[in-house]
Image: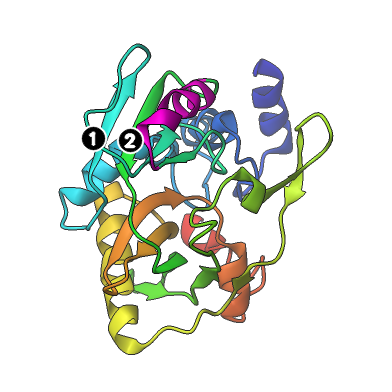
Amino acid sequence: MDQAVLKIKELNPSAVVPHMFCLLGMTAFRFFCDVMNIPLVGNPAAVMALSTNKWQTKAVVASHGVKVPEAEIISKGEVPKMQPPFLIKPCNEDNSQGISLVRELSTLQNALDNAFQFDHELLVERYVPLGRELRVAVLQMDDMSLQLLPCIEYFLTEEDPIRTAEHKLVTDKSGKPMGLASGGRKCPADIDETLREKLRDLATRSHKALGCRDYSLYDVRVDPQGEPLLHRGVSLLLICAQERGRSHGSASWARPEDSL
């Protein structure tokens, strides 16, 4: 860590565009930039620390009127009070590692054992029947308004109704992530104006509630009645911005000129 700080001082950057999306990269290294008075594109360390905890994120956005699935949090030795069907999710793990859909109590223990490999706290979340699975992003403009970017739709089936790690990552034989999985998605998604406005409202409320800066992005489940519910906030904006005609650099990835 000390070597990293020395290297940053040596480089003396005018601004930093983060490309580290591990926990340390999203929190500690962004904090270093703040301490060293280096302008940083995107969300600061405190916002990233909040957004990496699914339970805290849900609580904050729900207090600002965003619809979220019913949920509870449990630690080792505890069992959910909720009755199936529900999702078991490690609170602080990314890329759906350790996630399971529990339809019957007979599968609960295996789901708990799997999830506790990744975190000491688990989110138990009411399963929302399959409607649509969307990734929704907003980009902060020069006048501080938020522009809704084209959404990504992930195609799921009743037999395979949730996105797990296998949908998101390609791994080697040892299980080490080697890259992102492809296929099963469309960007821009086909969205009518009614749903678009609901998504815009959800993303705008969430962005402001979490204290986001420059941009923010959310995984959203749309139920069979067409109502969007927030699953979680995430950190990558690239695909959505590219579909809007912005390159990795020009979206600034968001906005280095504002940081400066």
Viewer-nearest residue: 223 or 35 = 223
User: Residue 253 placed where, x, y %?
Assistant: 58, 62
As drawn, 228 above or below 85 = below
Say if residue 142 shows up in the picture: no
Which comes before the other along the chain, label 1 or label 2?
Answer: 1
Disc 1 vs disc 2: Cβ atoms closer than 8 Å? Answer: yes
Residue 89 is inside the magenta segment: no
**Closer to us: 242 or 17:** 242
Residue 82's tag is 1
Q: Please, what secondary structure does the residue beneath circle 1 have?
A: loop
Q: Main secondary structure of the magenta part?
A: helix
Outermost residue, bottom side: 193
Q: Which residue is mark 2?
A: 124
What's the residue type where badge 1 is placed? Met
Q: Residue, x 61% and y 81% (percent of image)?
A: 245
Q: Residues within 10 Å of mark 1 (few under 14, many from 20)?
A: few
The residue type indicated by label 2 comes to Val
Of discs 1 and 2, which sits in the foreground?
Answer: 1
Which quadrant would residue 201 be assigned to in this image? bottom left
The magenta span reads: 103-116
Give how far across and how far down residue 116 sits, in percent.
48, 21
Task: Tell me, yes or no, whether the highlighted magenta stretch contains residue 110.
Answer: yes
Q: Quadrant of the N terminus?
A: top right
